Amino acid sequence: MTRAINKNKNLFMAVSFLLWLPQFMYVPILSPYMEYKGIPYSFIGIVLGSYGLTQLLFRLPIGITSDIKKLRKPFIIFGMFSSMLSCFIFLTMDGPGWLLFARALAGLAAASWVAFTVLYPIYFSEDKVHAAMGSITFIVVLAQLLGMSFSGYIVDVWGWTAPFWIGAVFSIIGLILSFFIYEPKDKRASEPIRLKGLVQVIREASLWKVSLLSILAHSVIFSTMFGFTSTFALQIGFETNELTWIVLAFMIPHAIATLFMGNVLVPRLGEGRSLMAAFLLTSIFTAIIPFVQIKSLFLITQGFQGFVLGLTFPLLLGMSIKSIRSEKRATAMGAYQSIYALGIVIGPLLAGIVNSQFGIASGFYFVGGLALIAALLIVIWFKEEIFTYPSFKNKEAKKHDIV
């Protein structure tokens, strides 16, 4: 029995990896590729933005439909197919309109992540939700690390379209494997799902609290590592061919942290304390970035920031569905992932405005302040747990499901 469960877990993680690797394989070169094709900057921005917009529009509907149909696997297969089709359109079609359609399809594939993150915890016991989310988040970060690290090299060796070819091959493999994913029957999902009950889930206060914290976390990472960190690094003396070292310095500790949170930190400190510590340290290591002018120290700072930010995402992911009945979790996850997508858009936008007005260093102070606000909100919302020792006086008493 254990052997079969482990086999299902490994297959699921392989498909998850193959969903994300193709997207991060070409993302770093997508903007210069479109510039090479002669597409104006204004339309490049529209193409890039379509990825987040598609997720914002489709994650919640996918979650609701998945709950109503009581199925996750078909949406996973659909996500893999969308990813594959996106790569093939990039390869075979020309013109701005087709590129926009291809990138929007990639966003649709990313929106299917709702079904992934709801199905995977079913392979675990209820008290292992955070460990499950840590494992699945690790796979995403690993895909980010490998894709972002090698995309530039692949283009240098094989040309602009090589990342799309590699992405298409991986997507085909992932699509084939997705048909073999095991979706167990949820015994608690026997009663019919009513839309009124799903609306109640979306209105749940705890879901909105976790989503707001995730908006702040995504604002930080998309304003720094996925935003202005490389720009600042070039200003203090890094060469363009050295930016890979910054990616590695950030992403490797970031990946390690996703496993550390659920397996080590939460069992010892509890959710509230762990999350507060992660955001507080994120605030510190983000705000000190402008003060670090030496390359070696800059890489070390990136490592610490990557690690503490990596602690936040799997914990928030697990908390978003922890208290939700299993047959309604896709709705909760869809709402959560749709809401935090705002941070991907708003964070860099505001940081860019601050940078324009006061200089690039001020942008790091600004997003560091966002992380500090998150830490303060956690103190307010989780004060009973944070200031009570031990954290888990009665684990069973805290287990509850939304009706």
Image (cartoon, rainbow, N blue to C red):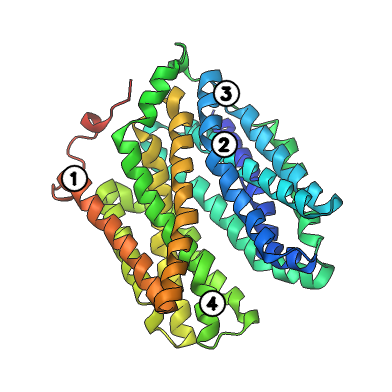
Label 4 amino acid?
Answer: Thr
Answer with mark 3 or mark 1, whichever residue precedes in sequence. 3
- Tell me the SS state at disc 4: helix
Tell me whether circle 3 and circle 4 mark residues in contact (CB < 8 Å).
no
Q: Which mark is residue 71?
A: 3
Answer with mark 3 or mark 2, whichever residue precedes in sequence. 2
The residue under label 1 is: 385
Tell me whether circle 3 and circle 2 mark residues in contact (CB < 8 Å).
no
Residue 179 placement (x, y as % from top left): 70, 31
Label 1 amino acid?
Answer: Glu
Cα distance between the residues tagged 3 and 1: 35 Å
Residue 260 placement (x, y as % from top left): 40, 55
The residue under label 4 is: 231
Q: Residue at x 47, y 68 (%)?
A: 352
| Left or right of 183, for residue 338 | left
| Nearer mark to the viewer, of 3 and 2 | 2
Q: Quadrant of the N terminus?
A: top right
